Image: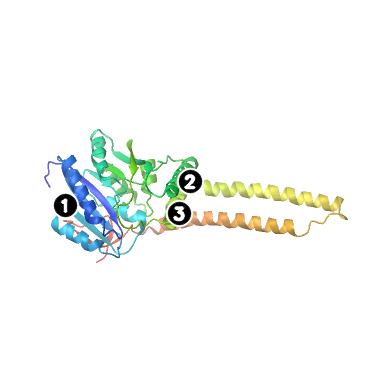
Amino acid sequence: MSSDRKTISVMIPCYNEEENVRPIYEAVRDEIKKSCPAYDYEILFIDNKSQDRTREIIREICAADRNVKAIFNAKNFGQFNSPYHAMLQTSGECTVTMCADFQDPVEMIPKFVAAWEQGYKIVIGRKTRSRENPLVYWLRGCYYKIIKKLSSTEQIEQFTGFGLYDCSFIQTLRELKDPTPFIRGIVAELGPERKEIEYEQPQRRAGKTHNNWYSLYDAAMLSFTSYTKAGLRLATFSGFFVAIISFLIGLFYLVAKLLFWHRFTAGYAPMMIAVFFMGGIQLTFLGFLGEYVMAINTRVMNRPLVVEEERINFDTDSDHGAKLS
């Protein structure tokens, strides 16, 4: 790469993407050469312990193109840690993050770069429509609206992390040392002035999505515990409210029993309803409390984001991640 030319880094996380890895590489490379000819490019794949031919194909790409780098994780470290770690390993003046399945349109890259050259340190893509499962898209929209209402920190609707980040912001991420990073919240909370560019999310090009209800729940709870106090506050207020209602109901039954003892036969139904109701309330909020405690525990342990198994086309080893010897 020429020293007098700026470099665009493109970070692409992978997990079982053998059908998409080569096409996304070619599409990104060709788009930058066509639409951003004044820039050099660096493409960084981070593989989260794929079980198919993804790594084999990445090796072939890296052997043919020295501008392509790869990090192979020792295990699957999840949908948040792996891409976040890879962002910290990029070396360009700006870093574009996108998925390998083509749901983040490649043609957005020159739009991001143009806005970056106007002075924006962060340029993000925000979905306005999607060709994915309509129910999933609607539920995501509901979640974004709820978390936006509950959070004291600004939250960005329909933002998945797809966007461009200036190297100064990447340096900010390196200094955070957060073992449970949530890039969507970090951008909203700590990022400088940003530009949002709307786009329609296309369908996955090939392969099977790795998002399921558990992974979506995991993302929702990470955001919930990181950026809201609503769960704990709701538990406090609900407990106070239920205690008052229980006291009033108990007082009513006591008075009724004293005044109409010979005719009052409430039976066990009210007691059983109260027991199950209170049990449900307690279990719900124990779950909320557990989520917060689990988030605290993860941060206290302060484990590395990922453990790397191998790097390809890196001239020197970075100090930002743990590595198997």
Q: Earlier in the sequence, mark 3 or mark 1?
A: 1
Vertical arrangement, residue 282 with respect to residue 9, above or below: below
Marks 2 and 3, how far apart at CA: 16 Å
Marks 2 and 1, how far apart at CA: 41 Å
Q: Residue 67, labelled with which disc?
A: 1
Name the side, left or right, on which 248 lies relative to 178. right
Q: Nearer the viewer, mark 2 or mark 3?
A: 3
Where disc 3 sits, the SS reads helix
The residue located at (69%, 48%) in the rendering is 245
Residue 314 location (% of width, % of height):
18, 56
Q: Earlier in the sequence, mark 2 or mark 3?
A: 3
Name the side, left or right, on which 174 lies relative to 149. left
In the picture as drawn, the residue positioned furthest to the top comes out as: 118
- Pick whichever, 302 or 195, lies toward us: 195
In the picture as drawn, the residue positioned furthest to the right comes out as: 262
Name the side, left or right, on which 231 lies relative to 26. right
The residue carrying mark 3 is: 217
Where disc 2 sits, the SS reads loop
Q: Is residue 318 shown to the viewer in this render?
A: no
Marks 3 and 1, how far apart at CA: 36 Å
Quarter of the image where the C terminus is located: bottom left
Q: Residue 228, labelled with which disc?
A: 2
Q: Residue 18, labelled with which disc?
A: none
The residue located at (82%, 50%) in the rendering is 256
